[in-house]
Amino acid sequence: MKVLIWHVHGSWATAFVQGPHTYVLPVTPDRGPDGLGRARTWEWPANAVEVPPERLRDEEIDVVVLQRPHEEKLVEEWLGRRPGVDVPAVYVEHDAPWGDVPLTRHPMADRPEILLVHVTHFNRLMWDNGRTPTAVVEHGIVDPGPQWTGEIERTAVVVNEPLRRGRYVGTDLLPYFGDGAGLDVFGMKVRDLPGRLGLPDARAYEDLPQERMHEELARRRVYLHPIRWTSLGLSLLEAMHLGMPVVALATTEVVEAVPREAGIISTRPDRLREGLRRLLADREEAAQLGKAARAAALERYGLGRFLADWEEILAEVTR
């Protein structure tokens, strides 16, 4: 099939385009949010192709994968077809609900012609989906391999735009966790974080290519996931695939993703800080937890299961 999809979330899209179809990605001269095209910091296969909006009507698109509300209008404008009416469509919801939780109504609520696919069961539970049919396809990860060495006795954190997103991603907790834990922060727009938070021992690694970031993460002793409110951080699942022990706030879907033997999860920051310091000091325990984390991630969030689930979804909506 030919699948029209926008490049919105890099890690998720990297897994999605590993399937057997042709993935058509709109590309505009400025490579803005609606025309980003292929990823440049991830490795994507050749069947993910860039097509300018003015040529999309010639592509004979079989199914549209929407990820943002305004993309519905773009499809009508660029394809001349209405999603769910003239062309099969699914809407992927990547985020936990914002606003008046748990009363937040989904933008696609009461749209029986569009299948609403959530990436976690928590998301489907918390959004008000109305009469729209729903499904859950949990994340899948392109396995980076068991790279963890833990040779650097420091703590790795991955977060994008921590200064803007603040309490949502636990930015305010970093000074508490980082006291004596040697924070190494990876992600987009993290360069100014150590200075703004007054963290003299923190180091920022700005927007590394994915392969390089995985290499650097795996050298750190432990992975910290201080995020209060998000769907389920793909960086957490990637760290588990690397074989890293994890310390995480027990919020949203984390309690499903991280079994007890794979890491330390709690809603009590003091327990997490204690566990973090213990793992930094005990490489043997860190290795044991990391091994279990990788096994759990491969079993539940493997790429094969993810792609098989999506084959069922696409077959259903195009049948």
Image: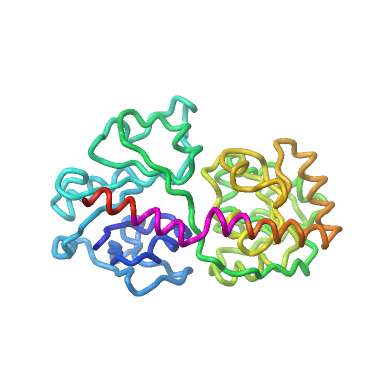
In the figure, residue 215 lies in which quadrant? bottom right
Asked if 100 appears above or below 136 in the picture, the reply is above
Q: Is residue 162 magenta?
A: no
Residue 36, image x and y in percent? 35, 62
Residue 17, image x and y in percent? 38, 64
Of all residues, the one furthest to the bottom in this rendering is 46
Given residues 165 and 95, the one toward you in this image is 95
Given residues 50 and 165, the one toward you in this image is 50
Residue 181, image x and y in percent? 80, 54
Read off the magenta span: 296-311
How many numbered discs, if any? 0
Q: Residue at x 17, y 46 (%)?
A: 82
In the figure, residue 293 lies in which quadrant? bottom right
Q: Is residue 153 left or right of residue 240?
A: right
Asked if 40 appears above or below 161 in the picture, the reply is below
Q: Residue at x 34, y 74 (%)?
A: 46
Asked if 114 appears above or below 238 in the picture, the reply is above
Where is the N terminus found, in terms of image quarters?
bottom left
In the figure, residue 31 lies in which quadrant? bottom left
